[in-house]
Amino acid sequence: MLATLIVGATRTAATFTTDPEKILALLNERLQGRGLVTCLALHIERDGSSVLVNAGHLPPYVNGRELPIEGALPLGAIPGATFSVLRFHLAEGDSLMLMSDGVAEAKDGKGHLFGFDRITEMLNTRTTAAGLAFAAQSFGQEDDITVLTTARDRAFAPPRLNL
């Protein structure tokens, strides 16, 4: 039910604005008393100018390097919450990888976490989104595992999504 509420509220908010801060503010108010949700809201312009707003989610990676965005409360935690905002530029050839916390929190049979060091190591070998998701799932899936990559291929072209 919560997922359905989030999808509907996001679609409604996006009909009025493409500003990630405003969308998360609207979602935050809609979720009060209904649960907590971590997420990122991202808007990428055709020229690569990007705005990323964090509501308690893991930071994404650009070209295998973690973006330095501050942490924030999840949606629904408190009315009127403000969220961390990062403005950056995706140059031609850059790739942006986003993932759910289920990747880092995957556990093997002995309780060891897949962890951020392993993620960084894999990204340094230019692993794909599918490769990272498969590695975390094979390690020991405890939670949802989602990895999404978008890349900026040419000037004036919208980003391409690779799942």
Image (tube, grey):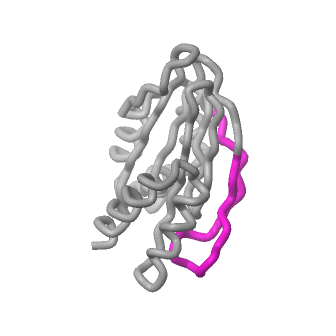
Total marks placed? 0
Q: Quadrant of the C terminus?
A: top left
The extreme bottom residue here reads: 33
Query: Does 73 appear in magenta?
Result: yes
Q: Residue at x 62, y 33 (%)?
A: 62
Can you say whether 2 is above or below 40 in the image?
below
Q: Quadrant of the N terminus?
A: bottom left
Q: Is 52 rendered above or below residue 39? A: above
Q: Which residues are magenta?
A: 65-86
Question: Could you say where residue 24 lies in the image, as x and y percent from the top left?
Answer: 54, 62
* Residue 46 is covered by the magenta coloring: no
Q: Position of residue 19 (x, y in %)?
A: 58, 51
Magenta residues: mostly which secondary structure? loop
Outermost residue to the front: 16
Q: Position of residue 151 (x, y in %)?
A: 50, 25
The vertical placement of 137 against 130, above or below, is below
Q: Residue at x 52, y 71 (%)?
A: 28
Examine the rendered structure and indicate whether residue 121 appears above or below residue 52. above
Residue at image location 51% in from the left, 52% down from the top = 17
Point 59% across, 34% down: residue: 121
Is residue 133 toward the left or the right of residue 98 in the image? left
- Name the residue nearer the viewer: 2 or 26: 26
- The reply, left or right, for residue 48 in relation to residue 137 is right
Q: Is residue 1 left or right of residue 50?
A: left
Q: Quadrant of residue 49?
A: top right
Q: Position of residue 111 (x, y in %)?
A: 45, 62
